[in-house]
Image: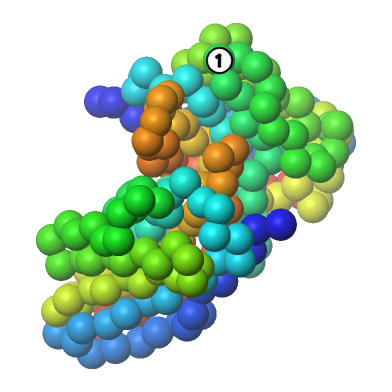
Amino acid sequence: KQEVTQIPAALSVPEGENLVLNCSFTDSAIYNLQWFRQDPGKGLTSLLLIQSSQREQTSGRLNASLDKSSGRSTLYIAASQPGDSATYLCAVFDGNKLVFGAGTILRVKS
Amino acid sequence: DTAVSQTPKYLVTQMGNDKSIKCEQNLGHDTMYWYKQDSKKFLKIMFSYNNKELIINETVPNRFSPKSPDKAHLNLHINSLELGDSAVYFCASSPPGRPFGGYTFGSGTRLTVV
């Protein structure tokens, strides 16, 4: 059974810092991995999608990497801003469904 | 706007009632899903439909019955609501074909059972 773990559970940083969020999964037989952002009381916004054959994807200040063989992904956020404060969710697609981690709650202080 | 839309956004109801949540997507996707986000914010799959056919039913009580009249709609009907059903329910969809495309989520329905 696929399990997804995100570390840390919560993170508080001053504005301007670069930061890394970690995601690990137990079964490397995935088709893709998706990072989402969820603001309080809101839905999920897709940030980056990495196919299993890819190593990384970039969008603006965000960079996500995937090491399928070791079951790990990282989300790198450069020059963090208060507007980046949200919960970040990692999810892997096993061919039938997305399996989510519990998320990392990020707070960027101004 | 191309999107996954859910209604209602908020639903407050008494124990024992029956309620429905509607979901529609205009993205041309052929697979739709219902996810439940509990009080600890953990998201878990409930159902998935592909072209109106049930694909996944993840040990959800049979008080929950999904219905897909066509591939653009997936509704969720809940009978005899219980306090433990209080959660946020998200609808999502994904495109056909390979490589497997990413999911698009609706904005959620916050269900409160009192």
For the question of whether residue B7 can be seen, the reply is no
Quarter occupied by residue B79: top right
Q: Nearer the viewer, residue A54 or A8?
A: A54
Q: The residue under label 1 is which amino acid type?
A: Asn
Residue to which mark 1 is pinned: B51
Which of the 4 image quadrants contains residue B76?
Answer: top right
Q: Point out the image quarter for the N terminus of chain A.
A: bottom right
Residue B21, image x, y percentages: 61, 29
Residue A32 percent coordinates (x, y): 43, 49
Task: Please state which of residues A95 and A85 is positioned toward the viewer in this rendering.
Answer: A95
- Measuring 37% from the left and 18% from the top, which residue is drawn there? B28
- Count of marks overlaid on the render: 1
Lateral position of residue B51 relative to residue A12, left or right: right
Q: Nearer the viewer, residue A82 or A91?
A: A91
Q: How is the image coloured?
A: rainbow
Report the front residue among A99 and A26: A26
Q: Position of residue B91 (x, y in %)?
A: 53, 35
User: Which residue is painted at 71% across and 50% down in the image?
Assistant: B86
Residue appearing at x 24%, y 57% in the figure: A57
